[in-house]
Amino acid sequence: MSNDTLRDLSQNPLVQRLGVPRIPVLRRHSPGAPLLTGPALVGVIGAGAFAEPVRALLEDAAVEVIASPDAGDEGKVAAVVLDATAARTLDDLAAVQQFLTPAVKRLAPGGRLLVLSPESDPSEGPLAGPSIDTDVEAAAVAQAFDGLIRSAGKEVRAGATANLLVVSPDAAIGSSVRFFLSARSTYVDGQVVHVGPATVEEPADVEHPLAGRVAVVTGAARGIGAAIAATLARDGATVVAVDIPAAGESLARVANQAGGTALQLDITAPDAAQRLIAHVQERHGHVDLVVHNAGITRDKLLANMDADRWNAVMAVNLRSQLTINAALLESDVLSDSGRIVCVASTSGIAGNRGQTNYAASKAGVIGMVRALAPKLAERGATINAIAPGFIETEMTATMPLGTREAGRRINSLRQGGLPVDVAETVGWLGQAASGGVTGQVVRVCGQSLLGA
Amino acid sequence: MPKTARRAAVIGGNRIPFARANGAYAQASNRDMLIATLDGLVARFGLAGLRIGEVAGGAVLKHSRDRDLTRESVLGSRLSPTTPAYDVQQACGTGLETAILVANKIALGQIESGIAAGVDTASDAPVAVNDDFRRVLMQLNRARSLGDRLRAVAGIRPGQIVPEIPQNAEPRTGLSMGEHMALTALQWKISREAQDELAVASHHNLAAAYDRGFFDDLVTPYLGLTRDANLRPDSSVEKLAKLKPVFGKGIGDGTGATMTAGNSTPLTDGASAVLLGSDGWAAEHKLPVLAHVVDAETAAVDFVHGSDTHGPDGLLTAPVFAVPRLLERNGLTLQDLDYYEIHEAFASTVLATLAAWEDPAFAKERLGLDAPLGPIDRSKLNVNGSSLATGHPFAATGGRIVASLAKQLHEKGPGSRGLISICAAEGQGVVAILEGA
C-alpha cells in the first residue's frame, strides 16, 4: 500500500549526501521470524520482580540476554528492557538514567526500548484514582516515566521505538513484552500502556497466539479491516469478516484469503447486533475477539455541518459499537477470555479541522472503552481502543500531496504506518494472554505530534 | 425418491446480482461469473480448501471452449481442486435439475455435500462460423495433399462469413419462446392487465426483500453491481400499460398482443449456486439447515404436433402436468403449500399455469383428475420477487429460487412447504417441493 517515494529515495547514498535525512525502513513481522535479531539488554532497579520473567521469556525465544550496559562485547543490542517497577524515589530515578544512558547508545536500528514502571499508587488498581495516604514522591516518580519515555521516543533513531508499560505488582506482562519487543509493534512508539493482573494462559505456540480463537472484524472488506482479518488469521484465529452487503465482493475475497467466512451485514441496521450474535452462536458457538473497525468519514466544517453527515458518522462509528457491545454483555456469546478492540483515531484525541463529527465519534469510542472496561473485567473480558495515526490506505493515497507529506512526516518515525501495523496491535490485544490490558488507548501513530 | 432415503438439506446459496444483457457483465464469461459465485458461496460458508462431494452445474448458452465448464470453474475457485464436477443442460430447468441431482445423490448416501450451480450469459453468447464454412474447414483439415487443400480452400465463398448466432427460437417450430407463450396466453385468455399486475408485484416484492435485508446472505455483489439491474422498485401498472406489445401481434385478430417488454423477462447475465448436504454434514460443519428437498418431478409436453384429441400443448406448460403428479405422489393438495415459486419466464406463463390448474375441463380431460387443483392464495406467490424483476439468466434461475425459497421456509418455520415450478424450452418443466427446517 505504501508508496512513500521520499522514504525510498532517502535510502540512496547520493540523496543522503544532499542532506536528506534517511527515513528508516521499518522491520515488520513475518511468520517464523525471530522475536529479536540481536541480544537484549535487561536491567532492573532495586528489587523489581519482572526482570526475571522477562529474561526467561527472552531465553525461551532464543534471545541472548545481557545484564548490564557495560557487559557483553559492547556491540549493538536489539532491545533494552528495564524493570523499574521498584522505583519509588528520585534516587531510584537517577539510577534509571544511569542505566539507560549507556544502554540507548547501544540500541541498534529498529531497536526497542521498553521500560516497566510502577503504578502511581501500587495499592490501587488500574481503574481507581490516588488514595489519601499516597506516597507523594513515589507517585511523582511513577509519573516521571511518562515524560522520560515520550522524550526517549523522540530521540531514538533509525526506526527504534520507546514504550512504557505501567505494571501492577501482579501484572501478566508476557504478551505485552513480546509485542513491544517484536517487529509487530513497529509503528507503536512513545506509548504508555497499563498492564494489570490476569488469569493468563500463555499461548501454546507463540507463532500462533490466536490459535483456536474466533474473531469478528467489522469493516473487513478493505483497508485496515482487511489487514486485521488477514493478520488475525495468520496468527491462528478463525475470522468472521463483516461488512456492508454492497462491499460483498471484496469481503468475500478477504474472507477466502483468511480461510474464514464473510458476513454481509449493515451494522447500523436495528437488528444488526442480534443478527451478528445469532450468526456467531450458530456457526461457532461463541466469539473470543470482536474488532470494531468499521468507520466512515463525512467531513464538513462545523459551520456547514448537517444532521445527515453528523448522524451517519455517529451511526457507524459509535452507535453500532455501543449497540453491539451492549448486546454482547447481555448474551453469553462472548467467551471468558473475550476481547473487544475498538478502532478510534488520533483525530478523536487531537481533533482535526473539518472532522467535528468524526472526531466526536472517535473520542466517544474512547469514552465507551473506559466505561465498559470495569463491567467487562467482572467476567475476565477486556476492552481497549486503538487510535491509528497516519496509516497509508486508499483514503490517504487520494489526499493532496502537501497534506499527505505533512501527515507522514510529523511523527518520530518520519513515515506513515501500514494497515498491518494496526492489525498487529489488534492481534496483541486479542490474545487470551493479554487479559491484563484493559481500558487502554493505544496509539498506532509512530508517536505523531498530533494527539500525543 | 424412496421414502426410506434421507432428505438432502438446503444449507444456503449464493448468487451474483443479475445484470441485463450487455450491461455490467458484458465482458464477463460464464466461467468468470460461475467462479465469482462459487467463491461467494465459499466465503459465506467457510468452504475454502474443502472437498465437496460434487458440483453439478451448467449453462444453456455455451461456447465450444466451455467444455466441462463446471469443473473448470471449480478449479478456478477457492474450493479444493479435489472436488469433482460435471455439466448439466436442460434449458431453463438446468439450475433446478442440478439441485435435484445433487439432492438425490445425498439422499442415497453417495455424497455428503454438494453444490448445484447454473450460469448464463446472453452478452458473451457463442457465435460460431456458419455450417457452409465449417464444412470447408473440416474438408481442409482432412486434406492430405496440396491439391486437396487448394480444392478445399477454393470452396470458400463470401457468404460464409455470416456467423451462426444462437437463436431464441424452437428448432422444430421456428417460433420464438415469446411467440409460443403468446399462443398459450391467448388460449387461456390471459389479459394484458393481469400480466402487468403480476410484473409490478414481482418488482415490488423483490425491492421489499432487498430493503429488509433478505438477500444479505443470498447475494454477493459482482463487478460493481449490488442489486439486480432489472429491478424497477417504482414500477407501476400505469407505467407498464404504456409499453407496446412485442409478442403475439399476429394472432387472435390482435387480441393476442398482450405481452410487452415489461411483462416478459429480458435477456440476462448471471449465476447462482446452492449448497446442499446431509443433516450430519451440515451439523459437523456447524452450518444451518434451511430446508429439505422433499421430492421433484419433471414433465415434458408435445408442443409440436398434438394428438387426435387435442392440439399441440403450450411450449412452457409442462409444469402444469408435472405438479399434479408431484402432489399426488406426496399426498398433498395444491393448497397445502405455504409458498409458490412459479418462474416468471413471462407473466402470462404464471397466469396460464394457474388458470390451467383451476379449469375443471382441463383437469378432467388432460390431467386425468376428477377435480381441478384449484386456486392458490396469490399472497403466497413469488413473495420475494421472481424472474420478471430479477431477470432470468437461464440456468441460474433454478438456484436463485431454491436458495431464496429455502430461506423463506426457514423463516416461516419447520414443516412449512414450498413449491418450485420452472418451465423450460423444448416443452419441458421441472418442479420440486421443499420443506422448511
Image (spheres, coloured by chain):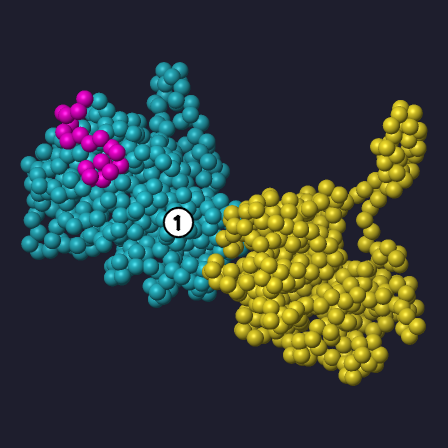
Chain colours: A cyan, B yellow
Image quarter hosting the C terminus of chain A: top left
Q: Residue at x 8, y 41 (%)?
A: A47
Up the image or down, A294 lies above or below A77; here it is below
Residue closer to the observer: A32 or B412: A32
Whether residue A76 appears in this view of the structure is yes
Up the image or down, B418 lies above or below A297; here it is below
Residue closer to the observer: A144 or B144: B144
- Give the image location of residue A101, x and y in percent: 16, 28
Q: Residue at x 84, y 57 (%)?
A: B170
Up the image or down, A71 lies above or below A340; here it is above
Quadrant of res A320: bottom left
Residue closer to the observer: A6 or A244: A244
* A68 part of magenta stretch: yes
Q: Numbered disc 1: what chain?
A: A
- Give the image location of residue A17, x and y in percent: 36, 15
Q: Which residues are magenta?
A: A54-73
- Give the image location of residue A135, x and y in percent: 7, 49
* B84 part of magenta stretch: no
Q: Is residue A396 left or right of residue A186?
A: right
In this figure, what is the number of numbered marks?
1
Q: Amino acid at mark 1?
A: Ala
Quadrant of res B169: bottom right
Residue furthest toward the bottom? B370
Q: Is residue B47 left or right of residue B149?
A: left
Whether residue A292 appears in this view of the structure is no
Q: Residue at x 11, y 53 (%)?
A: A123
Q: Which residue is mark 1?
A: A237
Q: Is residue A158 left or right of residue A253?
A: left
Q: Residue at x 84, y 44 (%)?
A: B164
- Give the image location of residue A124, x and y in percent: 14, 54
Q: Is residue A199 left or right of residue A302?
A: left
